[in-house]
Image (cartoon, helix red, strand yellow):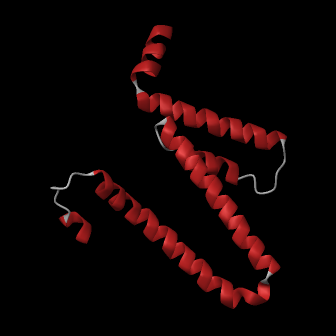
Amino acid sequence: MYLRLKALLISHAQFSHALRVTLAIAFTLAFYSIVHVPHSMWGPVTVVVVMMQPYAGAIVYKGFQRIGGTLLGALLGLLTVLFPHQLNYLIPVWMLAWVFFTVTKILWKKYLFLLFSSNDANYSFLSG
């Protein structure tokens, strides 16, 4: 029985990933049952969002994205609280920043590909 379970853990990456995610969620739930934090439901949600990537590098990248998004949201919330009368000016700035970051993320992959590709490559896929 032990050898069969060991073979299952080693041979099946999906099973081991599911076990990792389950243990991380269980640890998060145990932590929040000991330390009472308001809105503790977001802890397990964050674990699921971050750990749904099957590879360690993707998990770290997704974790940094989550931290960056949280910090950006906290900054925008703080600006809203500190300057409630200037919302007419802040909302267009937030929208332009969102468009800038979205377009930069989309185009970054295309320009990075152009930078490292050969000169005789066909770039027709970039037009659409």
- Residue in the picture at 45% in, 67% down: 104
Q: Position of residue 110 (x, y in %)?
A: 33, 61
Image quarter of residue 7: top left
Q: Position of residue 20 (x, y in %)?
A: 56, 32
- Left or right of 67 on screen, residue 54: left
Q: Position of residue 45 (x, y in %)?
A: 62, 51
Image quarter of residue 87: bottom right
**Looking at this view, is 114 or 81 the one in front?**
114
- Residue in the picture at 62% in, 60% down: 69
- Residue in the picture at 39% in, 21% down: 11
Q: Is residue 59 above or below residue 110?
A: above
Q: Is residue 89 above or below residue 110?
A: below
**Looking at this view, is 108 or 70 the one in front?**
108
Total labels: the figure holds: 0
- Left or right of 108 on screen, residue 66: right
Image quarter of residue 39: bottom right
- Left or right of 79 on screen, residue 26: left
Q: Is residue 74 above or below residue 60?
A: below
- Residue in the picture at 54% in, 31% down: 19
In this orientation, does residue 128 appear? Answer: no
The quadrant the C terminus occupies is bottom left
Q: Position of residue 13 (x, y in %)?
A: 42, 29
In this orientation, does residue 11 appear? Answer: yes
